[in-house]
Structures are given as structure tokens and as C-alpha cells.
Amino acid sequence: MGAGRRLEAAWVWTGETLLRDAAVMLDATGRVTAVEPAPGAPPGLLMPGLVNAHTHLELSDLRGAVPGGDGLFAWVTALLRRRREPDPAAMLAAAFEAREAGVAAVVDVGNTGASLPALAEAGLGGALLVEAIGLAPERWRVAFDTAACLRPPPGLRVGVTAHAPHSCAPELLRRALRGGPATVHCDEDPDEARVLGERAGPWAEFLALREPEWDARLGRAPSGTALLDDLGLLGPHLGLVHMVAAREADLDRAAAAGAGVVLCPRSNLFIGRALPPVPAMVERGIPLAIGTDSLASAPDLDPLAEAVVLARAFPRVPREVWARWTSQALARAKGRAKTLWASLMSRANRRPAARMPGRRLIANPRETPGS
């Protein structure tokens, strides 16, 4: 096993505390062994590697190609018209772009598992979740077969997840989400509750054209969160992605079960011009994580840029919340509590500060061999 490292910077964010003139000692695996004073440390901010808790590398070739602003159904319809086989070069470029932004781990969701080589080559840990969708077993069985054939490198877990309560049979939701850890799109748009509770709206028309007997096969509940709760699937193992249309009762259910929420604010603003009720989530103590969604609905894969949007939109929420949840979700993403310190600081100065939202203080830390 190789030697450890010592990283010094004028400011060190440990994930809980901001320290002045400090050094972080790492062992050969990247685990923090000590944090100690370092008088005269070079200017800059040193922090744990970031977690992008929700993205879709398979859509990386559609950056800027799918119009937004008219709601989720309109965006999905436009996406389906443009979608094609995943582009390996685009996925690889996106994975390295995430790494350049300081991302150490991701929760990448895709239908084919085709992003695995890109994640491995970029050295990103976390989870690759093959997404199943549909109301009949013949529609979603392929996702489980695909995941079973994937061989991830160490530090990257492969699993299966379900797309969303309004697009998946209860049987699929149980099979994909009961074991965890997993994430699931949930209550991203008010039309999801309409199809689940009233069997009305654009999603009802969409399903009627594609899924025989959809009315009998789709779960029934006042919201996606409520359906997951009724099925006994809410819990600390599950991250609810988006929750823009979540109601007070939905947040109460999530909080009571200990479920987390993954926020993707720039994607939400682009697709539906709305943000989730974040202050109400914070008040209830709901664990939060930050994702970017795909490059088809976000300009880049930078979780700190997402945190800046949240901090500006919700100024009464302490900013420490966002700094904490850009990195603390790592244990949830990787399935174990191991803190990685990414090469964010040594890469950041290669780009003009104006192109690094929320990262004005970051400069190269001093690095020396550890003991």
C-alpha cells in the first residue's frame, strides 16, 4: 500500500466545521486519519470530494438540445423525440467534467448500463442504478438482467431502481426499492399526483396509448410519496428525487420514515420554473442531497453550482446546510462512511473564476507526502 498524503490550505471545511490554517492527513485509501493545525498554509479552501447524488450520463449528448420551461410532460415528450443510443464519447467527457468540478462520487441513473466504462475511467465512485420502468413485467425485466451482467470496479456499486411511482407498477416499485440504497423520481410535477389519484391529466393519456390495462396496473394514491409510503417503501435507504410538487403531508410522510430528498434545482427551474419546498424539508429534518440531473436539463454536472442556486433562493436556510450535503451524501452514495478528498482544489485554478460558481475562494492547497 502506498504512502498517505498531507493537504494544507488556509481554509478547511471538514463537512461540519470551517477551520483556519489546517492540514488534512490521508492514508493511502483516501481516508482521513487526522486534521491538525498548519500555520502559514497557502490560500485556498480544501473540502471533501463532492457527491452528485442524481445524474443521467446516458443523456450527455443532449446538452442544450431539449427545450424546457413548459413543465415535465412537455420536456419528456421533447426528450423522447430526440433520444438515441447513448454516446460513449459524450458520457466519458461528462464523467471527466464532473471530476473536474470536484465530484468524487455520483448516483448515476440510466436504462442501459452504458455509462459504466465512463464512470470507471474517470475514477468516480458511488452507484450506477439501472432504471426499470413500466406496468408489465415484460417491460421492466430487462433492467434486472442488465444490472446482473455489469461488473463495476471497486468503489462503484451497481443496482436497479424504478423510474417513478407514476410510471411503474407497484410490483416493480417493491422489487426495485425495497432493498436499497436507491433513489427514485418522485412528485416532480403536479401532473404525477393527478394520474395517481384521479386517473387524469397528460400522463393518463400517455399511459393509455402505451400500456394495456394501465388503470388497473398503476398504483392509486394522492401522490407519489403517499404511494411509496402505502407500499412500505419509504425509509432511510431511499432518496426521493426532485419533490417539487410535494405537499405538507408528503413531507410529513418522508420525515417520519427517515427518507432523504435529492434536490436538482437548476433542472427544476429549467423544466418547470419551480423549486421544491426546501425550507419545509429543513424544518422537518429531512436529510438532503444535491444532484444536477442530466445535461439535457442542466448546464453542467457541478453540485456546488446547484448549492449556490439553493442558497440564493432560500437565504434563510443556513448555508452550512448546502456545504454539508454536497459531501455528506457520500456515505449514502457509496454505502459506507468513507470520506474522499477529491482533486477539486488542484484543478480549479485551471479555469477562470467566473466559470466556477460558488468557488471564488478555492486555490491550490499545499500537498506533501504523509507520514
Image (tube, rainbow, N blue to C red):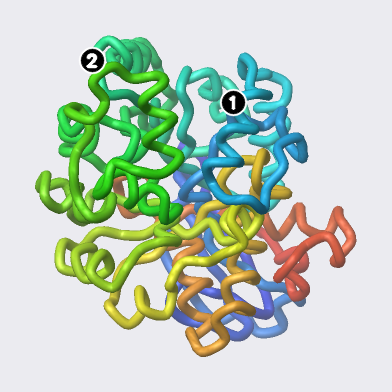
Q: Position of residue 90 (x, y in %)?
A: 72, 26
As helix, strand or loop, the secondary structure at mark 2 comes to helix
The residue nearer to you, when weighing 213 against 92, is 213
Counting every numbered tag in the picture gives 2
Q: Of marks 2 and 1, which one's residue comes earlier in the chain?
A: 1
| Residue situated furthest bottom in the rendering | 316
Q: Residue at x 51, y 23 (%)?
A: 116
Seen in the image, is 187 located left or right of residue 318? left
Residue that badge 1 annotates: 80
User: Who is closer to the viewer here, 342 or 132?
Assistant: 132
| Residue under the point 67% across and 55% down | 344
Residue at 74%, 37% (x, y): give it. 63
* Residue at 29% from the left image edge and 41% from the top image edge: 199
Query: Residue 94: image x %, image y %?
Result: 68, 35
Mark 1 surroundings: few (<14), some (14-19) or many (≥20) residues within 10 A: few
Comparing 347 with 208, the one in front is: 208
Position above or below: 36 against 275 = below
Where residue 24 appears, x then y in whole percent?
Answer: 53, 67
* 148 to 255, vertically: above or below: above
Q: Residues within 10 Å of mark 2 (few under 14, many from 20)?
A: few
The amino acid type, in three-letter code, at marker 2 is: Pro
Label 1 residue SS? helix
Q: Is residue 287 visible?
A: yes
Q: Is residue 91 above or below residue 333?
A: above
Between the residue at mark 2 and the residue at mark 1, the CA separation in whole angstroms equals 22 Å
Kindly identify which residue carries mark 2. 137
